[in-house]
Image: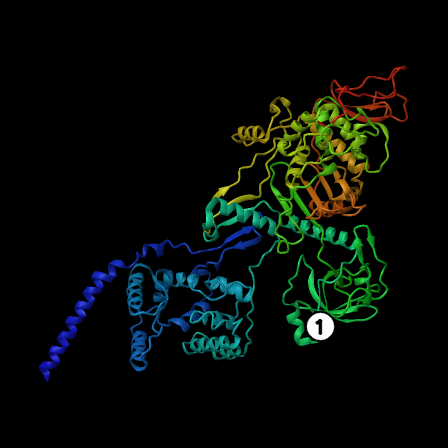
Amino acid sequence: MLRFILFALFGLFALALVAAGGVLWFVVPGLPSIETLKDIRLQVPLRVFTRDGALIAEFGEKRRAPVTLAQTPPLLIKAFLAAEDDRFYTHPGVDWQAIARAVVNLVKTGEKSQGGSTITMQVARNFFLSREKTYLRKLNEILLALKIERELDKDAILELYLNKIYLGHRAYGVGAAAQVFYGATLDELSLPQIAMIAGLPKAPSRLNPVTSPERARERRNYVLGRMLALGYISRTDYDSAIAAPVSASLHGQAVEVDASYVAEMVRADLVGRYGEDAYTAGLRVFTTIDGRLQRAANDALHRTLSAYDSRHGYRGPEHQYPAAGARDESAQTQLLAGYAPVGGLAPALVVAVDADGFNAVTREHGRIRVATDGWRWARRYISPDQRGGAPKTADEVVAVGDLVRLERVPAPAPEGAAVAAVAPGGLPPPVWRLSQIPAVEGALVSLSPDDGAVIALAGGFDFEHSKFNRVTQARRQPGSNFKPFIYSAALDAGYTPASFINDAPIVFDAPGLENVWRPENYTGRYYGPTRLRDALINSRNLVSIRLLRAIGVERGLTHATRFGFDGARLPHNLSLALGSGDVTPLEIVRGYAVFANGGFLIDPYFVDRIDTDRGETMWRAQPLHVCRGCNDDSDLAAEPDSIEELRAQMAAQADAARAPRVLGAENAWLMGSMLRDVIRAGTGRRARSLGRSDLGGKTGTTNDHRDAWFSGFNGRIVTTVWVGFDQSRSLGRDETGAQAALPMWIDYMGVALEGTPQDVVEQPQGLVTVRIDPDTGLLAGANDPDAIYETFRVGEVPKAATSGSPNLGQTRGPVNVPEQLF
């Protein structure tokens, strides 16, 4: 018997040696190198920030916020050790006691289990192996764990684990889990929350505190019990934590600035540069966006589009449910389930209506009341130019079961809004107002004229509602917003702000035209001989057409390319004078920047720098800068014949990092002066409400009021706004650039210019200001009481009037031009 036992033991020993040899021969050589763990790059999402570091967006399938062990609260570390591996700091990577328990369980039940895995073994599995439950994988896991422990210290292993472990809802690592489940950072977590997160690795889906709160509570309490048993927490802390409710809910990344259209531009740019790796490399992109001004842009666009919508009437509810279902409290949440806030407008279900107002239920704010002032505006929409009568009672506007939109607005006055309480500071609290998602859309883009940095951009009312970026993708006719480029071409051709052009009817009936073209002024009136300055101030269409005809369409087109426009996409006929070409707001604002900075063409950009996940800058923008002191027109590039030639000229300036001068300093200053008068006394005079004298700009309205524009600037900022329908149609007969678009520009610029000094490009040498007769454009007599001041280039100062001088002023340029479009 003894001999048999000895032979059996020897046989088992020999078998063990053979097995060990097999492992060494076949398994160990196939194990991956641990060197990859020493320089591991976790799949961290792409994050986009404002220029001052406020988060705009995050892109990537995996949510991860890597932390160092030093940044991890000690109590959280203890919670994970208690839940997963309390002997982590004493075993060699494999807990033989736990494995023995797993073997015993296998013998008793015949089932394989995951028990026995240490934190090091989980690191081995998460980084190198699959999750299948096979003996070979378990063997690989054990051997890898032993190898990891030989090459990495315990703290490095634990740090990898805490950043890699999957914890549910796309959250990888404890930093991401804290944000996803509690909207907090690790140091803001309470003990019950720490225990909840520490309990998740065992089964992230089954123990999810959002979808399975009761199972999650049981697991949390188990972790708390283990922490108590190990002496990590006191009995008092344990009792308090056990009694705490499950407080988890899903939280998105804490976006600090809403700039979704910019974020999408960045995402497309980064994927174009780095491919799909952009989503996982942990890149941190700092844009040129100013967070304060971006918020102002969003607010201005929302207010302007909502105001337009209110002017044209209420279109009715988004959906109508049966009244019985709407009154059923148990069904209300389900009826609202398919509707999300849009542009700050909350979806609401009307549940009760009386003469004075109505009650509605929202997901975010519960049951609320909309009083008389909140629905009285809602006259029925009939057409862009017609509304129904003013409603007298709320039931003329809404009914029980209506799915409507509501917004919170400042109360007009405590007594006027039936406010029950007054907020701190003596102001009444906001009240609820019936609203609707605007059918009209808009855009705002603002940039620095010194280097082209985009400081604010809003491509529409709400990105989730419509991802079409109207700043960069919408090609629309600019109307009169394009006229300054034609006037600049005329100055380049030898005209002056005092040159006269006849504002009189004109008819074109040329071969190739389908219809006779009879352009008119917006007012339908004609004003006879008009100085160019007055014509631009009042946006006279017929003067612009005659002016372009006088200098020649080709000259006008070529001059427009100096502002960055692609001449091939502009009309090669006289309709160019009225802005009939299709352009984007970004192209327009770039053109106006030339007037704002004194004659230099900048290249708009929105990415300032790209950092790695370790904070190292891997790319930084190198924009061309305006040289404000370089007013010598000797560096004025030869006039390009195409957009390609213009790009070549800009590339030639890149080495010096100087933006190319594309417009003479005198021309740029004179145009700035004329555009400041548009605000002082013309179609943009509503902007005088800003109380500044350094602002210039121009309205734009297209045929049938399909598009409304305003572009304006001072020396430090240039901004373009647009309002219109995506499917081009009339905004309504009174919706001009001054009415529909300019209020957006004023709202935004009021914030952008707050606390800034007046800023106008300095008048260059070569200009002189004299007194002229406004009726002739000639020099005025010393005692002329009606004389006005005008500025001219040296050599173009008009002569004094003579007794025989006709009262027509100067009309320079070609005269005998056929009255045809082409």
Query: To which residue does mark 1 refer?
Result: 326
User: Which quadrant, please, contains the N terminus?
Assistant: bottom left
Residue 40 spot, x, y in % from top left = 38, 55
Vertical placement of residue 169 versus 675, above or below:
below
SS at badge 1: helix
Residue at (34, 61) in percent of width and height:
153
Asked if one can make out residue 616 in the rendered structure from this viewpoint, the answer is: no
Asked if one can make out residue 46 in the rendered structure from this viewpoint, the answer is: yes
Vertical placement of residue 81 versus 702, above or below:
below
Q: Nearer the viewer, residue 76 or 176?
A: 176
User: As drawn, is 527 to the left or to the right of 517?
Assistant: right
Residue 33 spot, x, y in % from top left = 30, 56
Vertical placement of residue 511 versus 22, above or below:
above
Q: Nearer the viewer, residue 556 or 155?
A: 556
Residue 124 spot, x, y in % from top left = 34, 63
Q: Quadrant of residue 813?
A: top right
Q: Residues within 10 Å of mark 1 (few under 14, many from 20)?
A: many
User: As drawn, is 53 to the left or to the right of 710?
Assistant: left
Q: Quadrant of residue 454?
A: top right
Name the colour scheme.
rainbow
Which kind of residue does numbered mark 1 sit on? Answer: Ala
User: Which quadrant, please, contains the C terminus?
Assistant: top right
Q: How many marks?
A: 1
Q: Nearer the viewer, residue 726 or 269?
A: 726
Residue at (53, 55) in percent of width and height:
58
- Residue that extends furthest to the bottom in the rendered view of this protein: 1
User: As drawn, is 483 to the left or to the right of 31?
Assistant: right
Residue 773 spot, x, y in % from top left = 86, 23
